[in-house]
Image (cartoon, rainbow, N blue to C red):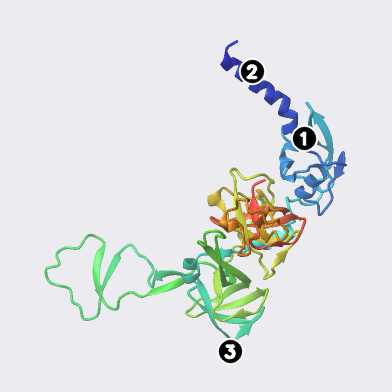
């Protein structure tokens, strides 16, 4: 037998032998059957069966009884079986009561899906803003009216017609040798057209520009946080326009920005998705814990400095680790023959040792921007902080 054929046969045998090892890993003490109840999530259920919950789709792979795992309902009975030595889930009963369960708690992420949370400075600069309140106060709450400017895009102050109009500035007359104008054009003497803003929406999110999000390693600016303040609706289109504040999470202030509401853009596909791993290796850091807190735990929302440009998609799972720490080895013996790099010793000659990263939890990405993503901590083994590194599983 030739050497290439022998190598190919060896590779095939290795794959066949190792195939069972590449199967999903079930948890010790896993159940053989679960009945889906209201409040369950796909992530919770997968965690009852699997050591790695992001491998959940493999449990129903090539399973005709569960054609769409996104649509599992309370009351469904899921039983674990084996096909060709591989675990599979089979739906034994169909509840179909209420809405299908989501991947993760919708109560936690729904607000983040319906609110902007990240804007670039150009979008903020071109957005509308509140200049004052009807009662002359400095702050306002739900039900109160406010005055705003620049709610829409700039347009001419005349309605377009079939005849195009060129206006001449005051004092400028038409020269006698103009010649014939193209058909449909005419000169009109008068004031130059002014530009006005026409609102492109009647309902707005009230946001307050916050801190800049930056890449943890390079310091590159990735966007600006838009702190969600509340909602408002247009009452009268004018300059200034009159709006009514319809809901708030905190007091509305002068200078708060108004952007067209995004609440109605949420669709079912945004609420139900499968957990998985990124298409390529992702390494980043947690750069914010929205809400002004310093520590996060299970079901907290975090922001990371990686997004669609880095291959992330909704549903991707990332591991969270602690930071590496450098400590001084105060107990190391002084050995004159020992060779150390200068930067690995302090000024007293003691070695400086770098402690490795340790596992801190898992996150599921649920909203992806170009360079920033938001995720929910699905599992935490310790307190999680900004600056902790995140990696592909």
Contact between labelled residues 1 and 2, with CB atoms less than 8 Å apart: no
Contact between labelled residues 2 and 3, with CB atoms less than 8 Å apart: no
Q: Is residue 385 above or below residue 158?
A: above
Q: Residue 152's x, y, as percent?
A: 48, 70
Query: Mark 3 Cα within 10 Å, few/some/many (few <14, many 20+)?
Result: few
At 47% from the left edge and 79% from the top edge, which residue is drawn? 239
At 57% from the left edge and 12% from the top edge, which residue is drawn? 2
Q: Residue furthest front?
A: 336
Horizontally, is 158 left or right of 8 in the view? left
Query: In which quarter of the view is residue 116 placed?
Result: bottom right
Q: Is residue 68 above or below residue 380?
A: above
Q: Which residue is mark 3?
A: 136
Give the spatial CA distance, label 2 vs label 1.
37 Å
Q: Which residue is mark 1?
A: 65
Quadrant including the N terminus: top right
Q: Which residue is mark 2?
A: 9
């Amino acid at each position: 037998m030739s050497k290439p054929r022998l190598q190919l046969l060896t590779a095939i045998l290795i794959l066949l032998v190792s195939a069972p090892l590449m199967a999903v890993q079930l948890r010790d003490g896993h159940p053989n059957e679960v009945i889906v109840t209201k409040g369950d999530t796909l992530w919770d259920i997968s965690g009852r069966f699997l050591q790695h919950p992001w491998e959940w789709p493999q449990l129903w792979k090539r399973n005709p009884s569960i054609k769409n795992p996104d649509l599992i309902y309370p009351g469904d009975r899921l039983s674990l079986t084996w096909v060709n030595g591989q675990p599979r889930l089979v739906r034994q009963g169909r509840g179909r009561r209420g809405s299908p369960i989501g991947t993760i708690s919708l109560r936690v992420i729904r607000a983040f899906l319906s609110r902007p949370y990240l804007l670039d400075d150009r979008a903020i600069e071109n957005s509308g803003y509140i200049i004052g309140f009807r009662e002359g106060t400095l702050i306002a709450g739900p039900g109160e009216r406010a005055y705003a400017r620049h709610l829409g895009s700039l347009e001419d102050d005349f309605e377009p017609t079939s005849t195009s109009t060129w206006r001449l500035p005051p004092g400028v007359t038409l020269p006698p040798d103009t010649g014939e104008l193209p058909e449909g054009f005419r000169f009109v003497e008068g004031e130059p057209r002014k530009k006005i803003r026409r609102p492109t929406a009647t309902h707005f999110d009230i946001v307050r520009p916050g801190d800049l999000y930056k890449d943890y390693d390079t310091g590159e600016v990735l966007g600006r946080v838009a702190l969600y303040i509340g909602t408002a609706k247009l009452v009268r289109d004018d300059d200034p326009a009159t709006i009514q504040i319809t809901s708030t999470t905190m007091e509305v202030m002068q200078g708060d920005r108004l952007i067209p509401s995004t609440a109605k853009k949420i669709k079912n596909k945004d609420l139900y998705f499968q957990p998985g791993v990124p298409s390529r290796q992702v390494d980043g850091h947690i750069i914010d814990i929205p809400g002004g807190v310093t520590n996060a735990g299970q079901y907290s929302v975090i922001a990371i400095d990686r997004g669609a440009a880095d291959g992330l998609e909704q549903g991707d799972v990332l591991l969270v680790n602690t930071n590496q720490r450098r400590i001084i080895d105060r107990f190391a013996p002084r050995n004159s023959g020992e060779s150390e790099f200068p930067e690995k010793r302090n000024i007293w000659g003691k070695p400086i040792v770098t402690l490795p990263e340790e596992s801190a939890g898992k996150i599921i990405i649920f909203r992806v921007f170009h360079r920033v993503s938001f995720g929910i901590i699905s599992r935490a083994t310790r307190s999680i902080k900004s600056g902790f590194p995140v990696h592909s599983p």
